[in-house]
Image: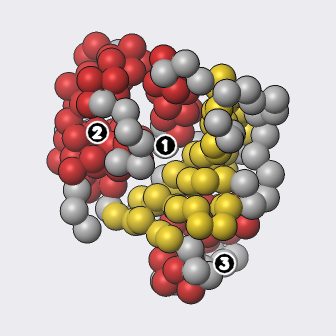
């Protein structure tokens, strides 16, 4: 099998690392060779966080180069726009429509770009975007955006519901399990 690539991009503190861990866990359970690589940047100060998840029969490198990502899973619209050149031809960006202001916007040195979804689509990119934050709040916690996005991502795989639930149960602390399962379901079943 040809190596498949997913980039998970966001801002520090949004749960990108848990998302990559959970995805890696389900891929390993399916017998794939999996490599996960994390690039933190200034994550503790609201900076970009990028995780590469690669899987296949044999994966030799954990790094995804420009034009290689089959899917970019983005926790924030500006991050989706920032990484478009890494998307493979025919790839998909799944993104939360949430906007998290970077430091230049917070300090007033820049403005948050408008209509990023339209600009991304104008590049000929398949963009699947929706308000994951609202769904996370509906599930019971704004911190469950990562599981809402994984629920949406699960529609691009042929893994069973039980396989996803097992990976969630093995990755999430018991006291947050029900919220995270609900968040996953809301993301999976959301109709745009």
How busy is the neighbourhood of tag 3: few (under 14 within 10 Å), some, or many (20 plus)?
Answer: few
Q: Residue furthest front?
A: 1
Query: From the viewer's perspective, is residue 50 above or below residue 129?
Result: above
Kindly report which numbered mark, 1 or 3, lies closer to the viewer in this rendering: 1
Nearest to N terminus: mark 1 or mark 3: 1
Kindly report which numbered mark, 1 or 2, lies closer to the viewer in this rendering: 2
> In which quadrant is the C terminus drawn?
bottom left
State left or right for residue 189 relative to residue 96: left
Q: Which residue is mark 1?
A: 14
> In which quadrant is the N terminus drawn?
top right
Q: CA distance from mark 1 to mark 2?
A: 15 Å
x then y, percent, for residue 109: 69, 76
Residue 46 appears in view: no
Q: Which residue is mark 2?
A: 184
Query: What residue do we see at 73% from left, 39% from top?
Result: 39
How busy is the neighbourhood of tag 2: few (under 14 within 10 Å), some, or many (20 plus)?
Answer: many
Nearest to N terminus: mark 2 or mark 3: 3
Q: Which mark is residue 110?
A: 3
Badge 1 element: loop
Which one is in front, 2 or 8?
2
x then y, percent, for residue 151: 33, 43
Query: From the viewer's perspective, is residue 63 above or below residue 118?
Result: above
Q: CA distance from mark 2 to mark 3?
A: 34 Å
Which one is in front, 159 or 74?
159
Nearest to N terminus: mark 1 or mark 2: 1
- The reply to whether callout 1 and callout 2 are in contact (CB within 8 Å) is no
Query: What residue do we see at 32% from left, 62% from top?
Result: 131
């Amino acid at each position: 099998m040809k190596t498949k690539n997913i980039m998970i991009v966001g801002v520090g503190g949004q749960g990108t690392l848990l998302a990559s861990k959970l995805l890696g866990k389900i891929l390993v359970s399916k017998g794939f060779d999996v490599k996960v690589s994390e690039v933190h940047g200034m994550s503790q100060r609201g900076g970009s966080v990028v995780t590469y998840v690669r899987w296949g029969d044999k994966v030799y490198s954990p790094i995804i180069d420009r034009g290689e990502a089959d899917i970019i899973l983005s926790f924030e619209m500006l991050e989706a726009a920032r990484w478009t050149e890494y998307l493979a031809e025919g790839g998909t960006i799944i993104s939360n429509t949430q906007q998290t202001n970077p430091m230049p916007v917070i300090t007033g040195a820049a403005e948050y770009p408008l209509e990023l979804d339209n600009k991304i689509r104008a590049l000929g990119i398949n963009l699947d975007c929706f308000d994951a934050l609202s769904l996370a709040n509906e599930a019971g916690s704004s911190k469950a955006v990562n599981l809402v996005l994984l629920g949406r991502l699960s529609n691009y795989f042929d893994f069973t519901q039980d396989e996803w639930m097992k990976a969630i149960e093995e990755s999430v602390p018991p006291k947050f399990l029900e919220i995270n399962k609900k968040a996953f379901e809301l993301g999976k079943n959301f109709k745009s």
